[in-house]
């Protein structure tokens, strides 16, 4: 599976009972000692946080997550409760949240489904079923339509090939040609061909396909997507292609956009940092600095208070 570049790694000399005591005292303190809660939970991995929660329940005879809900509020609460879910549980809950109730939050749905690896999606599907007693496919199908729906369903079906040690130049050429023939070459777009190639081929293969594509098309793949399709379908294909080319750069750009917007799109910032801190946030940080000339940590200084402290702690020290 995918190489990991986490910023949050297992704490050494870990003692769940000691941590549980610290959290219990922090919650009991008059006015709540947020700093201690941040220090403990942002510097432990998910399996360690689970152990702390078990130890807490043994000691306090109360559920730690409910206690945290009662003690914290605002964006800090959102971050801390997010950390009490595994990466797959968190992603599954974010997807559920984006399709629950009136209107779909397409932005969240697209970001998660189009950026997660095949392995991640396999796990998200099983966790989704466990948590919500529903099929992710059914929920996505019930909430989207047209080619946008077809693309998301193709991704959720997790049919992507594993990377192969053998480079198949003939297939690279055939796929590049097919993408061109299905879009830029003709009037209209044969979206089905685009969907099957982009949802079934391995990532290293697609990287080579997009290179080869340029020898057929006057526009690169991203430019072609912008010319050929619109709306949510365009956004989805663009996220996919950016992630095939450099996933951590995609997340860095998303963070930069979110931080730039007035009143920093807190939701996006929280989601990326919480969902990627045990996956590839270290690499996202280095892409961020290389691309924008300033560290993500420095940019996060624009946020405030305990929320800022929690985000900085999850990002770890500047490299």
Image (cartoon, helix red, strand yellow):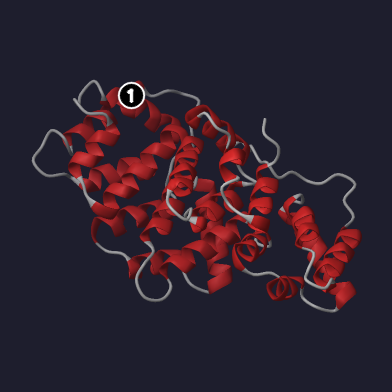
**Image quadrant assignment for residue 171:** top left
Above or below, comparing residue 129 to residue 199 in the picture: below
Name the foreground residue: 191 vs 258. Answer: 258
**Residue drawn at 22 percent across, 50 percent down:** 230
**Residue drawn at 56 percent across, 41 percent down:** 299
Above or below, comparing residue 9 to residue 213 in the picture: below
Q: From the viewer's perspective, tell me whether residue 249 is left or right of residue 173.
A: right
Check the image and name the residue furthest to the left: 187
Label 1 CA crowd tier, 10 Å (few <14, some 14–19, many 20+): some
Task: Determine if residue 164 is in view.
Answer: no
Q: Quadrant of the C terminus?
A: top right
Above or below, comparing residue 216 to residue 24 in the picture: above
Q: Position of residue 84 (x, y in %)?
A: 68, 62
Q: Secondary structure at mark 1?
A: helix
Q: From the viewer's perspective, tell me whether residue 262 is left or right of residue 173.
A: right
Name the foreground residue: 182 vs 30. Answer: 30
Q: Position of residue 109 (x, y in %)?
A: 41, 58
Q: Which residue is mark 1?
A: 211
Q: Position of residue 314 (x, y in %)?
A: 67, 47
Q: Position of residue 88 (x, y in %)?
A: 58, 57
Name the foreground residue: 184 vs 75. Answer: 75
Task: Determine if residue 44 is in view.
Answer: yes
Above or below, comparing residue 254 to residue 87 in the picture: above
Q: From the viewer's perspective, tell me whether residue 96 is left or right of residue 42.
A: left
Q: Quadrant of the N terminus?
A: top right
**Residue drawn at 84 percent across, 71 percent down:** 29
The total of numbered circles placed on residues is 1
């Amino acid at each position: 599976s995918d190489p990991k570049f986490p910023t949050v790694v297992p704490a050494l000399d870990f003692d769940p009972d000691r941590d549980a005591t610290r959290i219990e005292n922090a919650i009991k303190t008059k006015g709540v000692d947020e700093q201690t809660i941040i220090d403990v939970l942002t510097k432990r991995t998910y399996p360690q946080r689970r152990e702390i929660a078990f130890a807490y329940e043994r000691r306090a005879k109360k559920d730690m997550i409910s206690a945290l809900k009662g003690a914290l509020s605002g964006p800090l609460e959102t971050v801390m409760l997010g950390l009490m879910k595994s990466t797959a549980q968190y992603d599954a809950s974010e997807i559920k949240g984006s399709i629950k109730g009136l209107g779909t939050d397409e932005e969240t749905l697209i970001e998660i489904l189009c950026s997660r690896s095949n392995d991640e999606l396999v796990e998200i599907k099983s966790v989704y079923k466990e948590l919500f007693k529903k099929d992710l496919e059914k929920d996505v199908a019930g909430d989207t339509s047209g080619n946008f729906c077809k693309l998301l369903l193709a991704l959720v079906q997790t049919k992507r090939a594993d990377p192969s040690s053998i480079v198949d130049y003939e297939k690279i050429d055939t796929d590049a040609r097919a993408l061109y023939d299905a879009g830029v070459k003709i009037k209209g777009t044969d979206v089905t061909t685009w969907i099957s190639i982009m949802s079934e081929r391995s990532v290293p293969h697609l990287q080579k396909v997009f290179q080869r594509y340029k020898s057929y098309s006057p526009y690169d793949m991203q430019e072609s997507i912008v010319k050929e399709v619109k709306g949510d379908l365009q956004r989805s294909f663009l996220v996919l292609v950016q992630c095939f080319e450099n996933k951590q750069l995609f997340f860095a750009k998303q963070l930069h956009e979110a931080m730039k917007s007035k009143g920093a799109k807190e939701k996006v910032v929280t989601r990326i940092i919480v969902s990627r801190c045990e996956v590839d946030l270290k690499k996202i940080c280095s892409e961020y600095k290389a691309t924008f000339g300033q560290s993500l940590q420095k940019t996060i200084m624009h946020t405030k208070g305990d929320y800022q402290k929690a985000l900085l702690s999850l990002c770890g020290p500047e490299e």
